[in-house]
């Protein structure tokens, strides 16, 4: 079944990542980031190239005179002097390299215990840590190679002057980087900064998705998309997962290119962030005839790994902040202020998410035919993912309940009107959680007052909504049941399952 987009919806100029070079570059940029050894080893290899260049200059450049304008510490006159200085630098850099490695491991350990193991990935990706390790490794290699080039017996070219000067400069830069690294570690491990950086990562993910959406054609007719999904469920061919793990990334351009070439439509059954097992259907292909070669290409374009990533998984960034807040509320830490900070940043993220245009998830080719249907995350699920577990863990803490209700009031004045239902449902659940622990009368009154602030903000946006406090004798609710698509995803009014 091919669904034509109306002319106003067509967008041309979509760039496909269908070439082998494009696929290779996409894989490279995706995999290099979370590895701690790639950049240090690349910088170490560059230091070998740098040493080869400096040794070539040592043989061809006479540095015995005419370079008095250089700083004196870069000029060496005797092999014994070079030997002493290079030996001292080698010992210092080797010690610093071991210190930075041990400090990094300690930082990862503290981050895992205090903030959550899923945040270790972002500490590994920190460019300051990677560049510092690479610079120290480069400095050690340069010192070793230059020291091996010194001829203490004298003779022509007994002192590699250019190599010596470059090694000294690189060593000084390494010590400067150590100071920057220590400052970075001291500031980056603070909970408020970590929470803020995670939310900024979410903003970058949204920006990347927006760029992808502008690049490809989007189809916005919900009824037509629903017809395509129904046809795929009825007669489409299933593509099974080839590995156990989380769906990490969908190479949209690659899928779109293959589907356009074979004249098929792909309906995704799982979105990035959801767990799949071998043999479980992850997509449907329509028409079913000739779908087997497309299934092979789909499995190559759908990245499945051991962990969730933020690249296309907006929920994952929300869960990272939620995890910090949950650990802050635990009996071992009992840090209410950090939990409230997490709520504030989650609210900021939801305000931006709630202003986004709703999506059908359908992508068209240059001819206006639907070729790919993704599974967008409903805003109601994003609200539950952000607040449910924090609300449940902080039900006996009036400060958390009050901050949640204040945040929901802020959401009610910011998000699109069609999202007010989700805000109202969460406000009712927060009120019920806060009163279920029987707080002291003054706290209970304050919780009710903040709830009335939420309902007033919702009523101001939607005058037809009549909201009363649950338990007051009326059963008037803001909103209703969760949409059917989200119910199939496993979303509930309680703990979010993903």
Image (tube, helix red, strand yellow):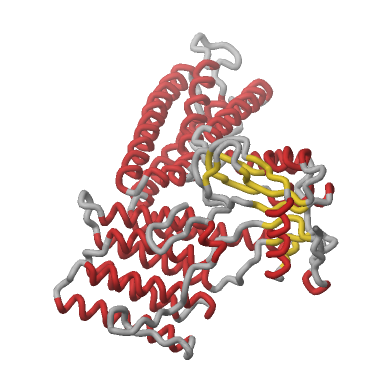
- Name the residue at 38% across, 84% down: 467
- Name the residue at 47% across, 77% down: 420
| Quadrant in the rendering for residue 21 | top right
- Name the residue at 60% across, 17% down: 157
| Residue 351 on image: x %, y % | 48, 71
| Quadrant in the rendering for residue 387 | bottom left
Q: Nearer the viewer, residue 40 or 254?
A: 254
Instruction: Residue at the far top: name it.
Output: 153
| Residue 226 on image: x %, y % | 68, 64
Q: Nearer the viewer, residue 169 or 403?
A: 403
Instruction: Residue at the far left: name it.
Output: 440
Q: Quadrant of the N terminus?
A: bottom right
The answer to whether one can see residue 169 in this image is no
Left or right of 18, for residue 62: left
Q: Nearer the viewer, residue 297 or 197?
A: 297
Left or right of 238, for residue 396: left
**Relative vertical location of residue 22 with respect to residue 87 in this rendering, above or below:** below
Left or right of 92, for residue 374: right
The answer to whether one can see residue 249 in this image is yes
| Residue 50 on image: x %, y % | 61, 29
| Residue 218 on image: x %, y % | 72, 65
**Relative vertical location of residue 247 with respect to residue 418 in this rendering, above or below:** above
**Relative vertical location of residue 440 with respect to residue 63 in this rendering, above or below:** below
**Relative vertical location of residue 189 with respect to residue 359 in this rendering, above or below:** above
- Name the residue at 76% across, 53% down: 265
């Amino acid at each position: 079944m091919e669904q034509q987009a109306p002319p106003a919806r067509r967008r041309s100029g979509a760039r496909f990542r269908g070439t082998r070079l494009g696929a290779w570059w996409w894989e490279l940029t995706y995999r290099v980031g979370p590895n701690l050894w790639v950049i240090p080893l690349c910088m170490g290899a560059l230091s070998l190239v740098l040493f080869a260049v400096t040794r070539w200059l040592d043989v061809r450049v006479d540095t015995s005179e005419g370079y008095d304008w250089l700083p004196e510490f870069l000029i060496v006159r005797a092999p014994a002097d070079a030997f002493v200085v290079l030996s001292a630098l080698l010992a210092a850099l080797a010690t610093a390299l071991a210190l930075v490695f041990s400090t990094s491991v300690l930082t990862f350990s503290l981050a895992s215990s205090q903030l959550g193991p899923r945040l270790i990935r972002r500490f590994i990706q920190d460019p300051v840590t990677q560049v510092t390790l690479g610079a120290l490794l480069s400095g050690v290699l340069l010192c070793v190679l230059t020291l091996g080039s010194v001829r203490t017996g004298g003779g022509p070219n007994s002192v590699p002057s250019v190599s010596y000067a470059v090694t000294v400069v690189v060593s000084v830069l390494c010590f400067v980087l150590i100071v920057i690294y220590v400052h970075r570690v001291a500031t980056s491990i603070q909970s408020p900064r970590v929470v803020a950086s995670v939310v900024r990562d979410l903003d970058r993910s949204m920006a990347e998705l927006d760029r992808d959406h502008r690049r490809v054609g989007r189809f916005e007719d919900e009824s037509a998309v629903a017809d395509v999904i129904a046809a795929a469920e009825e007669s489409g061919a299933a593509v099974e997962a080839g590995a156990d793990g989380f769906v990490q990334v969908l190479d949209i351009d690659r899928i779109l290119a293959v589907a356009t070439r074979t004249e098929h439509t792909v309906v995704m059954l799982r979105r990035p962030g959801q767990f799949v097992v071998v043999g479980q259907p992850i997509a449907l292909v329509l028409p079913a005839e000739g779908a087997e070669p497309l299934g092979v290409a789909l499995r190559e374009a759908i990245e499945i790994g051991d962990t969730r990533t933020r690249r296309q998984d907006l929920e994952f960034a929300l869960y990272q902040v939620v995890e910090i807040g949950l650990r802050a509320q635990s009996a071992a830490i009992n840090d209410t202020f950090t939990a409230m900070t997490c709520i504030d940043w989650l609210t900021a993220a939801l305000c931006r998410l709630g202003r986004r245009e709703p999506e059908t998830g359908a992508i068209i080719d240059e001819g206006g035919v639907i070729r790919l249907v993704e599974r967008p995350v409903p805003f109601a699920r994003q609200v539950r993912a952000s607040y449910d577990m924090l609300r449940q863990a902080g039900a006996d803490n009036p400060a958390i309940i009050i901050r949640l209700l204040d945040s929901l009031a802020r959401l009610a004045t910011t998000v699109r009107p069609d999202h007010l239902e989700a805000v109202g449902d969460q406000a009712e659940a927060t009120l019920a959680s806060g009163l279920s622990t029987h707080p002291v009368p003054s706290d209970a009154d304050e919780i009710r007052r903040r709830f009335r602030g939420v309902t007033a903000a919702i009523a101001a946006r939607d005058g037809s909504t009549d909201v009363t406090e649950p338990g007051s004798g009326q059963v008037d609710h803001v909103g209703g049941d969760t949409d059917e698509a989200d119910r199939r995803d496993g979303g509930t009014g309680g703990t979010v399952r993903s």
